[in-house]
Image (cartoon, helix red, strand yellow):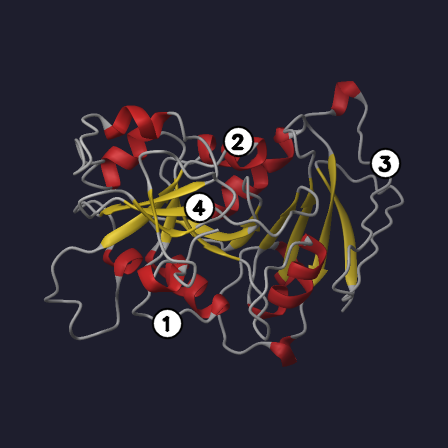
Amino acid sequence: MAVEVKRCGGSAVLPLSFQRSLNPFPCGVSFQNMQPPPQLARRFFTLAVVKRSPKRLKYSAPRFTKDDGLLYVDVDPFGSDAWKLEPIVELLKKGAVGVIPTDTVYAIVCDLRSPSAIDRLRRIKNIDPSKPLSILCHSFKDIDTYTTGFPRGNSSGLSNIFRAVKHCLPGPYTFILTASKELPKQCIRYGTTTSKYAPRKNVGVRIPDDAVCQAILQKMEAPLISTSVKSPKENEWILDPVVIADVYGPEGLDFVVDAGIRVADPSTVVDMTGNSPRIVRQGKGPKQPWMIAEDEDSSVEDSNLLAP
């Protein structure tokens, strides 16, 4: 796959080294001259445009990056160079589908308000139309808009679950709540005859504790639809953004935000729609006293949720 290097904001082109590998072990990615002079810091930055191979595409879909390529942006995991994310936000608002980091694993995301982008995300990840998708939120305001909110109490006598939840978010938890009328039907279920007449479904919501992810969400005017990045052949997380670009770039991905290699530790998924908060997948977030743990053989598949 050819790699074309360009410089945004000016005509000058500086030497750039971009090393990539299909090796499943940590890959090296090095960018030279990534730190612009202070006086040009907000005008110039270096990025890589990785051209795709049309022969490997499974379907034809519109692309949103220049020269029909994949935009690859290397950022500081702590968010010190968040200005590099501006073109990513612009692409998302135009209907692009790409990969961003979270406080757990990497996620494939798109704008919640773009039906065509949601459709492309499902095609890229090969997600069944009957599977609901989770959403990444910037704040509790987003959760209040797109869900009916958290329950007031539980069967164990906890009277204020919302106060307990506030201690967990932002953080590595996905809470399953009842979707509100504001949530697009494509996020719940679509493409099936029964879904049209089914009662309102549930949706997984997250507020990630990640500087890069939050910087993107803050600039968006709505949450992002998300699904975790796993290998299409093996049921394993892909933790290296370089490998993610190799695997999903040819399938129609528009961009990848590289914030370093992650650890294979997804979010803890908690179902809040029953009598008591029930853990359906134990992940990075520790079990809280007010949560009920499931049997060891329970998995996130039981809840039909695809969450990073």
**Image marks 4 and 2: residues in contact by CB distance under 8 Å:** no
Quadrant of the image occupied by residue 299: bottom left
**Image marks 3 and 1: residues in contact by CB distance under 8 Å:** no
The residue that label 4 is drawn on is 268
The residue that label 2 is drawn on is 215
Image coords of residue 126 (percent x, y): 46, 71
The residue that label 1 is drawn on is 128
Of the numbered discs 2 and 1, the one sitting upstream in the chain is 1
> At label 3, which amino acid type do we have?
Asn
> At label 1, which amino acid type do we have?
Asp
Marks 3 and 2: which is nearer the front?
2
Q: Residues within 10 Å of mark 3 (few under 14, many from 20)?
A: few
Distance CA(mark 4)–CA(mark 3): 39 Å
Of the numbered discs 4 and 3, the one sitting upstream in the chain is 3
Q: Residue at x 65, y 29 (%)?
A: 78
**The residue positioned farthest toward the right in the image shown:** 15
